Amino acid sequence: GESVGLHLPTLSVQEGDNSIINCAYSNSASDYFIWYKQESGKGPQFIIDIRSNMDKRQGQRVTVLLNKTVKHLSLQIAATQPGDSAVYFCAENYAGNNRKLIWGLGTSLAVNP
Amino acid sequence: GAVVSQHPSWVICKSGTSVKIECRSLDFQATTMFWYRQFPKQSLMLMATSNEGSKATYEQGVEKDKFLINHASLTLSTLTVTSAHPEDSSFYICSATGTSPIRTQYFGPGTRLLVL
């Protein structure tokens, strides 16, 4: 089912530090995972994705780690910048779900200058 | 690549009127489009899945006669909020995905609806 939350977890980091945002996903059958970034008043922006046959994938300044044993996903942002301040959502999908995404609650990242 | 636009970006209307929101994939063919609603500080709530040329599939609790969805082409889907009421005020976001097996959804910038 869908995840709807009333209180967004918040992560506050200093500019230049590394950020780690965590996500626990719900369905053991999920085999595709995506991280999105959403700035205030805007639509979600694709950051990086990973399939279940991988446990790590790197992009530009970002790394996604997947631990299927404990159904855990993380997004690491290196050298966090003020422009990284946003809400970050993880989303999962499993084959046969008509490509619908199941969304996490979101984490608000605040970068302090 | 994978740019999705939405129009209008914001709309204010009187209670009882209907509002149409357009979602376009600008540089790819979107076989499937999704419509979401989002309340402040909450996650995205899927309203319906729209496949080109067929009727939309609505999520449980979403009134299909209230939220009319049309996906007439591979680049355009529309959401019409009929007889809008203040409780329909929200942030509406569309996303689009290409041909299966692609599962990545690309999102539009969203439409802020305020019903007075």
Image (cartoon, rainbow, N blue to C red):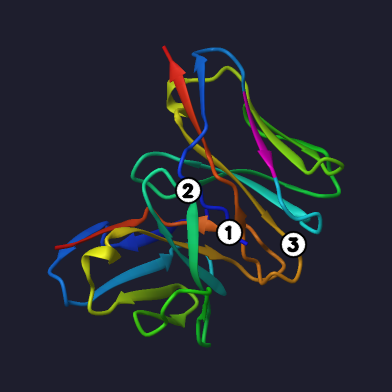
Disc with the residue nearer the chain's start (3 vs 2): 2
The C terminus of chain A lies in quadrant: top left
Residue type highlighted by circle 2: Pro
For the record, the magenta segment spans: A20-24
Q: Which of the two marks, 3 or 2, is nearer to us in this view?
A: 3
> Are the residues under marks 3 and 2 on the same chain?
yes
Instruction: Name the secondary structure under disc 2.
Output: loop
Could you tell whether B44 is left or right of B22 in the image?
right
Whole-angstrom CA distance, mark 1 to mark 2, is 17 Å
Task: Identify residue for label 2.
Answer: A44
Disc with the residue nearer the chain's start (1 vs 2): 1
Residue A98: x percent and y percent?
66, 72
Whole-angstrom CA distance, mark 3 to mark 2, is 20 Å
Residue B34: x percent and y percent?
50, 68
Question: In which chain is the residue bearing label 3?
Answer: A
Q: Main secondary structure of the magenta part?
A: strand
Q: Which residue appears farthest toward the front when viewing the image?
A: A6
Residue at 50% x, 47% y: name it.
A5
Q: Is residue A100 above or below residue A112?
A: below
Q: For label 2, count other residues whose C-alpha is less than 10 Å away and answer few (under 14), some (14-19) or many (20+).
A: many
Query: Any mark on residue A2, and which?
Result: 1
Instruction: Name the secondary structure under disc 3.
Output: loop
Q: Which of the two marks, 3 or 1, is nearer to us in this view?
A: 1
Q: Is residue B30 visible?
A: no
Residue at 63% x, 62% y: name it.
A1
Residue type highlighted by circle 3: Tyr
Task: Identify residue for label 3.
Answer: A94
> Are the residues under marks 3 and 1 on the same chain?
yes
Residue B7: x percent and y percent?
29, 63
Question: In which chain is the residue bearing label 1?
Answer: A
Residue at 42% x, 57% y: name it.
B108
The answer to which quarter of the image holds residue B24 is bottom left
